[in-house]
Amino acid sequence: MKVLFFATLRKLTGCKETEVHGAPDLATLLGQLGERYGFRFAREVFPGGELSRDVIVMVNGRAVEHLGGLQAALDEDDTVAIFPRIAGG
Amino acid sequence: MKTTAAWLHRYDRQLRLNEVGIEGQRRLTRARVLVIGAGGLGSPIAYYLAAAGIGCLGLVDEDVVSLSNLNRQILHSTGDLDMPKVDSAAAKLRRLNPEIEIHTYREKFTSTNAQDLVKSYDLVVDATDNLETRRLMNETCIRLGRPFFHGAVSGFFGQVMTVIPGRGPCWQCLVGDAVLESPSGGTPVLGCVAGVIGSLQAIQVVKYLVGAGDFKIGKVLMFDGLSLGLDELEVERDPYCPVCGEKLA
């Protein structure tokens, strides 16, 4: 599946997007991304194993909250977007 | 609708655009636009909308100008410190374009005044600095059927989304319905990034009013000022969205 990163998360990943295979749900995907991009990424996106309130995760254009959260099922052809909740003005 | 020589001269460079012309300019002159926030985003939004000849601009902000605002809030100057932002803003905008009406509301946008404020305007532009107010703006606009032009910034980054009620997702579909707590303390913002995002919002408002171009319904535009790029991300209407969803719990 394709994973897109935006804004400050790009500083942690060093890239705008990546491909991940073999993740049947969001928790597994984030675990794989944490291994790939390290502690700071994991702390930013899913501190303590919970999805951060400061980050939005969308699967195919829908926020994951109503798709099962960390248990949201993923397919190989899905697009997952991860970005910070931006509040400033 | 007046089309005096001065009116034609003031708007000459946009009257020449096929997408605007005399009829488009008349639409802008008839438009009533509410800008919520007179800070980093509100500055370029209000400046450009006033310059474009939006006939009636409403400005909502309860704050006064402080020194730490001035790296980005270009409607205000050092001489305006401690002045209400809406008054400081209105003074500059009236100097820029005395032909338009400017209404100021020195108050916080709350559930108490939200409907009264929004219902007397054609559309709402998001220039606030927190998630709680955005949630209320989005909800009020969906309820009253008013287009909502969202923008937000942080550091070198920003985002823009146009919400047309009944035609695609709303802002809440984008952010989900988790507790909307804004980060404590001031958000770091490079002033010119607020300029970019506010300008994009103003472009979308003008296009909407004259009926030109792509409103990017169902997309959020993500600006990255570090790598310098603008990305589009698809946003679906969430059937379980607490504001616009068809399957509300």
Image (spheres, grey):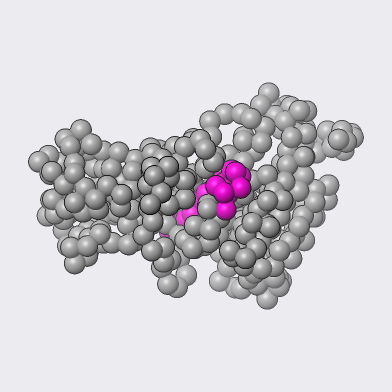
Q: Is residue B7 above or below residue A42?
A: above
Taking the image as shown, residue B241 lies to the left or right of residue B147, namely left
Q: Residue at x 12, y 44 (%)?
A: A23
User: Would you say residue B142 sits in the magenta stretch?
Assistant: yes
Residue farthest to the front? B249
Which quadrant would the N terminus of chain A be assigned to in this image? top left
Q: Residue at x 62, y 35 (%)?
A: B208
Q: Is residue B53 above or below residue B108?
A: above
Taking the image as shown, residue A55 lies to the left or right of residue B7, namely left
Taking the image as shown, residue B150 lies to the left or right of residue B85, namely left
Q: Is residue A13 visible to us here?
A: no
Q: Is residue B215 visible to us here?
A: yes
Give the magenta range. B140-157
Q: Residue at x 41, y 66 (%)?
A: B181
Residue B55, image quadrant: top right
Measuring from the top left, give residue B191's x and y in whole percent: 53, 58
Measuring from the top left, give residue B158's x and y in whole percent: 45, 51
Measuring from the top left, give residue A18's x and y in whole percent: 21, 41
Q: Is residue B25 above or below residue B238?
A: above
Q: Residue at x 25, y 59 (%)?
A: A51
Q: Nearer the viewer, residue B63 or A37?
A: B63
Q: Is residue B104 above or below residue B147?
A: below
